Image (spheres, rainbow, N blue to C red):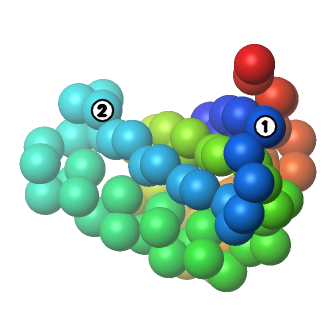
């Protein structure tokens, strides 16, 4: 999983979730996106930032608590793009 942070916006954080074909078929991609959206909702994000969360295959089957940890770590370490 990769998280990219974009700065410069005002207001609450914005999040986009992407799952490509490497994650699996449409059912697995949709499951990955749903799980990531819920995990992101449980992690405090920087106000005024926009995040792009890119799913990887382990996102589909990982225990949810572990997924939340991954998102928290990745959001904290996200490199800022301009």
Work out whether 5 lies above or below 35: above
Left or right, 38 with respect to 45, comes to: left
Count of marks overlaid on the render: 2
Under tag 1, what secondary structure?
Answer: loop
Q: Which residue is mark 1?
A: 7
Res. 69 visible in picture: no
Residue at point 75%, 22% (across, down):
81
Residue 66 percent across, percent down from the top left: 67, 69
Q: Residue furthest left?
A: 26
Work out whether 5 lies above or below 46: above
On the rendered image, what quadrant is the N terminus found in? top right
**Most foreground residue, 29 or 75:** 75
Residue 29 percent across, percent down from the top left: 25, 50
Q: Which residue is mark 2?
A: 20
Q: Residue furthest front?
A: 10
Picture quadrant where residue 69 is located: bottom right
On the rendered image, what quadrant is the C terminus found in? top right
Picture quadrant where residue 45 is located: bottom right
Work out whether 47 lies above or below 6: below
Work out whether 73 lies above or below 52: below
Picture quadrant where residue 7 is located: top right
Residue at point 59%, 56% (across, down):
14
Disc 1 to disc 2, C-alpha distance: 24 Å
Left or right, 62 with respect to 3, comes to: left
Q: Residue furthest top?
A: 82
Under tag 2, what secondary structure?
Answer: loop
Res. 39 visible in picture: yes
Residue at point 39%, 41% (across, down):
18
């Amino acid at each position: 999983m990769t998280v990219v942070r974009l700065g410069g916006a005002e207001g609450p954080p914005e999040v986009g979730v992407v799952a490509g074909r490497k994650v699996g078929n449409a059912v697995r991609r949709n499951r990955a996106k749903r799980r990531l959206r819920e995990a992101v909702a449980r992690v405090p994000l920087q106000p005024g930032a926009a995040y792009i969360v890119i799913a990887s295959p382990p996102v589909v089957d990982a225990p949810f608590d572990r997924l939340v940890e991954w998102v928290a770590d990745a959001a904290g370490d996200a490199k800022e793009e301009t």
